[in-house]
Amino acid sequence: MGRGKIEIKRIENSSNRQVTFSKRRNGIIKKAKEISVLCDAKVSLIVYASSGKMHHYCSPSTELVNMLDGYQKASGKKLWDAKHENLNNEIDRMKKENDSMHIELRHLKGEDINSLNYKDLRVLEDALESGLTSIRNKQFEIVKMMREQKEMGADRNGGY
């Protein structure tokens, strides 16, 4: 015996609606996986529940960003405006800068320096010497201040 046809309209009972959503969501995700495997298709699926929770599937070796870029090119619909493109470029620039700073920090720690040439090593040495000088000067200031505070405390106590 087959399933009967149902009228496609909003299910009023919230409990029944949730059960139906869950079953149909799982069914459509299963179908997306099947068509991806059987037909070697690139599939991306995003489903938002009425609660706002997102469920998604993306076929293996497929990235959603690439799928959306392909959709944008094929449909002619602009998904990203210039502001988003600029933000994306800024994020990429900051990631590169962050990577560069991590490399520089490792070099300052004496790690991964085998790839540096003589000139780079001299620059690194100068930076380290400058930093060491600043640290020693700050230490000297702190010791001097502590001595002065100690002497002032001794003067106060000795005068009584």
Image: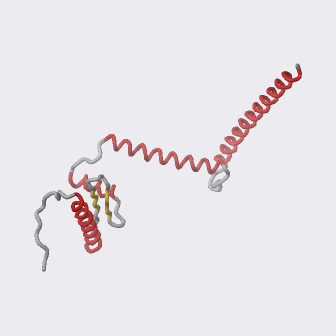
| Figure quadrant of the N terminus | bottom left
Placement of 2 over or under 18, stated as above or below: below
Placement of 139 over or under 91, stated as above or below: above
- How is the rendered protein coloured? secondary structure
> Whole-percent x and y of residue 99?
53, 49
Answer with the quarter of the image where residue 60 lies: bottom left
| Figure quadrant of the C terminus | top right
Q: Give whichever of 121, 1 is nearer the camera.
A: 1
Residue at the spot x=72%, y=37% of the render? 135
> Whole-percent x and y of residue 41?
27, 68
**Left or right placement of residue 76 versus residue 89 in this view:** left
Residue at the spot x=77%, y=28% of the render? 145
> Whole-percent x and y of residue 71?
25, 55
The tally of labels here is 0
Q: Give whichever of 53, 42 is nearer the camera.
A: 53
Furthest-bottom residue in this view = 1
Placement of 140 over or under 124, stated as above or below: above
